[in-house]
């Protein structure tokens, strides 16, 4: 696979993409990767159908011409409270890259972090953040839930600024939160 | 949600009595006990793998640190009262449930805070016992110490590592404080580490600031009973299920850079 062939296009996905996502493979066999893969294959598009009217649920894919969807992510609004009351923020639901494209560098994309090439996963994250930034009804806070054993995803959270860590009701996961610059 | 750990180890009590000085914990505890300023404590036989006897572990109510401080400042009566109250708390049902968990026998052993926090994530009884014991501890401290009660702040380590000084961001105010660590702490502490900061008056215009690991309880106890699903098992967002934005994040500078605009085609 030649690197200069990689120019993925971002597209909002919907019901018409359900069949393609049923074959999406992103797990190397680790339990938390299996969980993501099963979610993308079996639930993501159904969930989008019934949640989008309520939570602004969005599914965004990266596509390569002649290949199809090589990465997919989703987000929706969620409620959060602070001393001033309850506000809408963003829950980053899933970020998944097809197994053969994991770690692939996009040489055509300008660097997002000094000294680091842009990988497909990092680019997908930037696409999702760009989409999230367009939701003016939400406050600029982001949260996500990551398996504690998933060092790669936790490192990505650290790099993009989802640095505030807290426990959730299940010891296998932690919640990461951050605030986006306005 | 960060709270104080309701227990203290021998070294922490010794450090509260003689801050900034090298003391042998066992000798310090002997001296405190002789002055009536130490509770009975909780001890437990440690068994390693295969039933091998691993020794005896001791734990004390965290009120013993307040007793040690009171003795240090010449308030012997207050110290003895706190030690008596500490013994009562150590014999309470919540303490009896929690002590074996805090005295975990895993190798490498987690701190008492980590062991309790971990257990609280999967066991509602543990969650409730921690809250109850912490509440009782705070109540006794407030009743006995009155105006001399130390100010307790909570925060999170936001930077630091090998060769880089540790900084804490204080919850509620977002202020940053340097965290002074010893060798053992510097191997444990990392960004995200929950910290309890205790500020006490030490004389005219003098403050003594001490740090300890905070106990980070899950914020949603209602979900504790059900933890067998996946990270995606989320009900539709409602105001009732709102998560809490830490005040420190609310007032602090942005952590996520403004993204580059990227076109997304809509079908």
Image: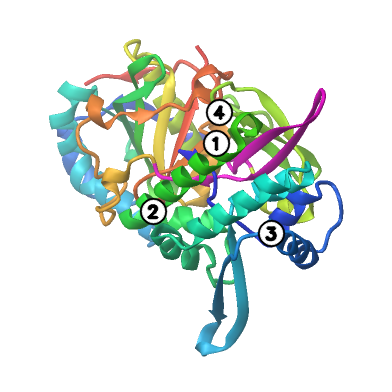
Image marks 1 and 2: residues in contact by CB distance under 8 Å: no
Residue A38: x %, y % from top left: 26, 52
Give the mark, 3 or 2, whose residue is nearer the N terminus: 3
Name the residue rendered at 65%, 22% in the picture.
B175
SS of the residue at dot 1? Answer: helix
Q: Nearer the viewer, residue A85 or A46?
A: A85
Mark toward the start of the polypeptide (1 vs 3): 3
Q: Are marks 1 and 3 in contact (CB under 8 Å)?
A: no
Q: Could you tell me which quadrant the C terminus of chain B lies in?
A: top left
Give the x, y percent position of residue A9. Answer: 38, 27
Mark closer to the chain start, 4 or 1: 1
User: Which residue bears the numbered disc 4?
Assistant: B171
Cα distance between the residues tagged 4 and 2: 24 Å
Which residue is denoted by mark 3 in the rendering?
Answer: B36
Give the side of residue A45 with respect to residue B66, left or right: left
* Residue stretch rendered in magenta on the structure: B191-218
Residue B65 x, y percent position in the rendering: 66, 50
Residue B129 - label: 2
Does the residue at mark 4 contact the one at mark 1 (Cβ under 8 Å)? no
The image quadrant that residue B118 belongs to is bottom left
Is any part of residue A64 visible from this angle?
A: no
Q: Nearer the viewer, mark 4 or mark 2?
A: 2
């Amino acid at each position: 696979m030649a690197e200069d062939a990689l120019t993925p296009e971002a597209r909002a996905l919907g019901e018409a993409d359900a069949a393609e996502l049923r074959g999406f493979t992103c797990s190397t066999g680790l339990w938390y990767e299996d969980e993501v893969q099963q979610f993308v294959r079996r639930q993501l598009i159904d969930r989008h159908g019934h949640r989008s009217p309520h939570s602004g649920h969005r599914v965004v894919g990266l596509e390569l011409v002649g290949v199809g969807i090589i990465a997919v992510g989703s987000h929706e609004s969620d409620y959060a409270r602070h001393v001033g009351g309850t506000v809408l923020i963003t829950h980053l639901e899933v970020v998944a890259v097809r197994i053969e494209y994991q770690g692939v560098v996009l040489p055509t994309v300008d660097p997002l972090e000094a000294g680091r090439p842009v990988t497909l996963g990092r680019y997908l994250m930037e696409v999702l953040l760009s989409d999230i930034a367009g939701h003016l009804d939400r406050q600029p806070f982001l949260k996500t839930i990551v398996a504690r054993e998933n060092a790669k995803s936790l490192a990505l959270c650290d790099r993009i600024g989802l640095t505030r860590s807290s426990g959730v009701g299940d010891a296998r996961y932690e919640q990461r939160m951050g605030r986006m610059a306005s | 949600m960060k709270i104080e750990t309701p227990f203290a180890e021998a070294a922490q009590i010794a450090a509260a009595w003689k801050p900034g000085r090298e003391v042998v914990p066992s000798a310090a505890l002997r001296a405190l006990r002789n002055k009536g300023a130490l509770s009975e404590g909780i001890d437990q036989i440690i068994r390693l793998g295969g039933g091998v006897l691993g020794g005896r572990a001791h734990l004390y109510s965290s009120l013993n640190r307040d007793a040690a401080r009171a003795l240090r400042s010449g308030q012997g009566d207050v110290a003895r009262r706190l030690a008596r109250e500490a013994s009562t708390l150590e014999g309470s049902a919540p303490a009896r449930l929690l002590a074996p968990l805090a005295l975990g026998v895993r190798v490498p052993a987690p701190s008492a805070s980590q062991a309790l926090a971990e257990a609280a994530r999967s066991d509602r009884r543990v969650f409730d016992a921690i809250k109850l014991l912490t509440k009782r501890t705070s109540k006794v401290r407030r009743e006995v110490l009155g105006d001399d009660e130390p100010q307790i702040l909570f925060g999170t380590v936001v930077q630091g590592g090998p060769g880089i000084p540790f900084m804490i961001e204080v919850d509620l105010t977002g202020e940053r404080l340097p965290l002074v660590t010893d060798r053992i702490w510097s191997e444990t502490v990392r960004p995200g580490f929950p910290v309890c900061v205790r500020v006490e008056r030490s004389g005219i215009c003098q403050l003594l600031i001490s740090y300890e690991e905070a106990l980070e309880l899950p914020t949603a106890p209602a979900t504790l009973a059900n933890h067998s699903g996946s990270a995606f098992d989320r009900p539709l967002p409602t105001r009732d299920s709102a998560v809490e934005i830490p005040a420190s994040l609310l007032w602090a500078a942005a952590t996520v850079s403004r993204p580059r605009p990227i076109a997304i085609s809509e079908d």
